[in-house]
Image (tube, rainbow, N blue to C red):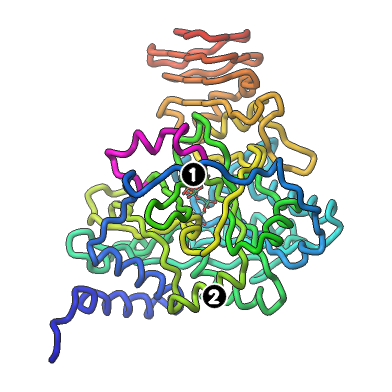
Amino acid sequence: TTSAPSKMDLLWPAYQAKMQSEGCNEAAIAAFKYNYGVLVSGADVMIPESRLAPVESLPEYDNLTVTSDPSLLKQTVVLKLNGGLGTGMGLDKAKSLLEVTSGNSFLDLIAKQVASMKASFKTDLNFMLMNSFATSADTLEALAKYPELGTGSDLEFVQNKAPKVTASDLSPATWEQEPGHEWCPPGHGDLYPAMLGSGTLDKLLAKGFKYMFVSNSDNLGATMDLKILTYFATSKAPFMMEVAVRTDADKKGGHLAKDKATGGLLLRESAQCPEEDEKEFQNIGKYRFFNTNNLWVDLAALKAQFQANSGSIPLPVMKNAKTVDPRDKNSTKVLQLETAMGSAIECFDGATALVIPRSRFAPVKTTSDLLALRSDAYTLTPDFRITLAEKRAGVPPDVKLDGMYKFTDAVEKMIANGPPSLIDCKKLVVEGEVTFAKGVTIKGSVTIKNASGSTKEVQAGVYEDTTVEL
Ligand code: UPG
């Protein structure tokens, strides 16, 4: 008997052909095929509240009693995710090219951090980047002045590209005006298939590397920590996520939870939360732990995952609805299939999480984050980390800038005389167009409003728990 071809049998060959003629490797095709299969099956990709239980307690960094073992450094690769563009902040290049502080971009600070780690651990340290087709050239150019960081395939591998899917009939999206728009980066969960497909994973294993520490390039608090490495290695866990205790400033990103069915840990990204559960997602008393995206991976366990799952890792799939030309809202409606690196926590038996001090987490997702980071609420350490000032006791200021400050050039204008002091600021809200005079100090919760329609200056002085109408 012959059965009717499945929907997947009918739809898949066009993608296979498209990816092959584009030169995508086997691992990239296998990863996309898995994601696309989930889409075609019609499965609900959301993670509803009903599936989750909160995580009550976890081991904490401050209570670890391990004796650091520096010999582990030689078996460890430090990797930064650098595939993302700064589009959301008005930059058409890699986000890590943005200036963070005193003439240093994220990449400058990362290069200086690595140099400083090598000096302080008195050993070579293997450093790598995952770039995307959109960030590779600019990044390599910016890093050319740090040759000691590494070069060529020792320094980077480039992540995969995935075909965009036409929303109406699930066929491969086409856009003849600009065929580049037919492809997208498949999210940072692509780290794993990209490592496999580029040969990086096998190369590292062959050279005797055992562990990988990976983090976001926008997190300048994430550097090698020997105590954590030693804890991870001696725990023999295949995978470990560094989590931070959530604060009011941590509304985006993903939180850790327990899968009620299996009792295992899982990550829920905001894109995976059904609208009706949004309130619970934001409940920082219930879901206390936040994924910092600082992850520790046992490379042999990663390789075993691929072997056990016929060459792909079954990460939860996220559907991102867009238009094929991102700038043309009238162009074809498409779905972009993405995965998140931290979701792998549910794939590895025995995966764990560790609560880390806030100093290891200083992300820049928005210009509000950037303003806070430029202020005295954060400090640049001698080893080039950016961390919350000690006086903040682990709590970042909650900054909310007006929508007109979405792009960095607007923020540069606002703080042309220097950023306000935020060391004692709980919350700062800016509504309307303002500039800060030199010498503005914000304490407690302050709202600054300018409804006039033209720029007004916030004059020098101390503003404490007040609303200022300019
Ligand atoms: N990135 C890639 N390739 C991609 C997408 C992103 O390399 O296809 C990089 C990007 O350059 C950045 C990092 O991945 O360095 C993180 O990407 P971003 O979009 O900024 O992070 P989010 O998806 O917002 O959040 C991640 C985790 C989330 C966590 C948060 C912490 O998914 O769970 O809470 O990081 O900042």
Residue occupying the far right of the picture = 122
Residue occupying the far bottom of the picture = 1
Q: CA distance from mark 1 to mark 2?
A: 27 Å
Helix, strand or loop under label 2: helix
Q: Say which quarter of the image contains residue 126.
A: bottom right
Q: Position of residue 311 (x, y in %)?
A: 45, 77
Can you tell which mark lies on residue 118? none
Residue at x 34%, y 45% (from the top left corner): 273
- The label nearer to you, 1 versus 2, is 1
How many marks the image carries: the answer is 2
Residue 168, relative to residue 290: is it above or below? Answer: below
Amino acid type for the residue under numbered disc 2: Ala
Q: Earlier in the sequence, mark 1 or mark 2?
A: 1
Q: Are marks 1 and 2 in contact (CB under 8 Å)?
A: no
Can you tell which mark lies on residue 55? 1
Residue at x 30%, y 44% (from the top left corner): 274
Residue 354, relative to residue 373: is it above or below? Answer: below
The region drawn magenta spans 271-289
Q: Is residue 440 magenta?
A: no
Q: Say which quarter of the image contains residue 387.
A: top right
Residue at x 26%, y 56% (from the top left corner): 44
Q: Position of residue 414 (x, y in %)?
A: 54, 24
- Residue at the spot of label 2: 304
Count neighbours of disc 1 (C-alpha within 10 A) and say few if under 14, some if 14 to 19, many if 20 or more: some
Q: Position of residue 41 (x, y in %)?
A: 24, 66
Residue at x 58%, y 45% (from the top left corner): 58
